[in-house]
Image: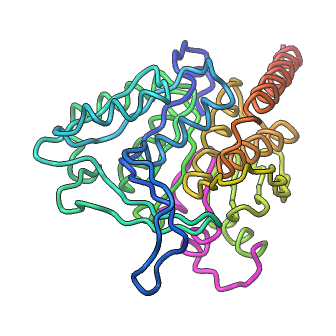
């Protein structure tokens, strides 16, 4: 990180960069193995994709945070994307509209017990970053990143990912990477600050055949170059963390499940992205890389927000916001003490 650049004024606390997806969500009594299922409820045209869930996670713990989103979208349904994003209250939305293409659209089928199936719709005409990010859009994207304390990068082309990470480091923006398939082959070469992925993704990246989740995480930690933290989620189980600056390794236990109202359904999509939004927002506030107990507590808060998201637990929002404010106060005291010591 360019420490001098961190001192520059950055109006946004976080920007999320990934493909936006319009999700049609439905709850079924089971995922059909024989072609038959009963639909229990549906929620059409919901904001999806990492960029949406990252913003939702950050907004839930910090209602006043200044958030930005960047994505490619289809020109024909650009207005519908803005409408879908209104509820997340981003302060800046950069949509790179592409003519003759449509925004990514998915049907997400879920069961009350948390099973899910995602079907991509209209893939032939869907936008992507590989083909549809022109030079002007790239300049706009870099400009937003330069104005943000943190950038969370989703499933982007590997060359674009490497360039944006290098740019973020140059201008003093914390880079958090949540990689996808196109980035797996080069993941060991990417110099992000924080890396967040799940166990299945870690197995793919490392080629691990071990039945031990702890072994998979150890192999991942040796494989990547993240400067600050390597974080591996396990789908509702513990979160594995390597504190690269402080030299700590932790296994953060899962949060207890809240009591759900009768007839309420879980939301088994976007949990890892919510965690990334909260962690990225918190870690980007100080002007230096957080480590030790402060890093651990940021992960705990992110896990709590992801659990609340999964169980649709809006009642815990005030508690999460209070925890976030206490964490920020501790980070400020820690930074002030470090500056006094350096002086």
- Does the segment drawn in magenta span residue 124? no
Q: Nearer the viewer, residue 289 or 309?
A: 309
Is residue 139 shown left or right of residue 90? left
Would you say residue 249 is visible in this rendering? no
* x, y percent for residue 170: 50, 32
Vertical relation: 126 (above or below) 57: below
Q: Nearer the viewer, residue 136 or 279?
A: 279
Count of numbered tags:
0
Vertical relation: 258 (above or below) 324: below
Residue 3 location, quadrant: top right
Q: Nearer the viewer, residue 261 or 13?
A: 261
Is residue 294 shown left or right of residue 32? right
Q: Who's the residue at 21% across and 36% down the image?
A: 97
Would you say residue 216 is visible in this rendering? yes
Q: Who's the residue at 41% across and 22% down the image?
A: 92
Q: Who's the residue at 65% across and 52% down the image?
A: 264
* x, y percent for residue 215: 76, 76
How did the renderer colour the structure?
Answer: rainbow
Vertical relation: 328 (above or below) 316: above
Q: In the rendered structure, which segment of residues is drawn in magenta?
A: 185-213
């Amino acid at each position: 990180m360019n420490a001098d650049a961190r001192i520059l004024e950055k109006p946004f606390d976080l920007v999320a960069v990934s493909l936006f997806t319009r999700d049609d969500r439905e709850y079924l009594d089971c995922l059909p193995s024989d072609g038959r299922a009963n639909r229990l409820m549906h929620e059409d045209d919901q904001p999806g994709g990492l960029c949406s869930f990252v913003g939702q996670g950050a907004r839930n713990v910090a209602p006043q945070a200044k958030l930005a989103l960047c994505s490619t979208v289809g020109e024909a349904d650009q207005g519908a994307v803005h409408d879908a994003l209104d509820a997340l209250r981003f302060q800046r939305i950069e949509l790179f509209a592409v003519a003759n293409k449509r925004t990514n659209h998915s049907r997400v089928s879920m069961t009350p017990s948390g099973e899910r199936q995602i079907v991509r719709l209209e893939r032939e005409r869907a936008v992507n970053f590989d083909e549809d990010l022109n030079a002007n859009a790239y300049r706009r994207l870099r400009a937003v990143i330069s104005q943000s304390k943190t950038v969370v990068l989703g499933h982007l082309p590997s060359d674009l990912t490497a360039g944006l990470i290098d740019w973020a480091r140059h201008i003093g923006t914390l880079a958090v990477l949540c990689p996808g398939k196109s980035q797996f082959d080069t993941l060991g070469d990417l110099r992000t600050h924080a890396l967040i992925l799940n166990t299945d993704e870690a197995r793919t990246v490392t080629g691990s055949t071990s039945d031990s989740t702890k072994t998979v995480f150890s192999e991942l930690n040796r494989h990547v170059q993240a400067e600050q933290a390597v974080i591996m989620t396990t789908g509702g189980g513990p979160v594995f963390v390597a504190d690269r600056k402080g030299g700590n390794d932790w296994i953060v236990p899962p949060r207890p499940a809240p009591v759900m109202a009768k007839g309420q359904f879980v939301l088994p999509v976007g949990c890892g992205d919510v965690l990334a939004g909260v962690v990225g927002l918190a870690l980007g506030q100080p002007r230096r890389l957080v480590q030790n107990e402060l890093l651990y507590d940021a992960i705990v808060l992110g896990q709590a927000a992801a659990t609340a998201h999964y169980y649709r637990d809006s009642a815990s929002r005030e508690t999460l916001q209070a925890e976030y404010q206490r964490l920020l106060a501790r980070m400020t005291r820690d930074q002030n003490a470090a500056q006094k010591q350096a002086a």
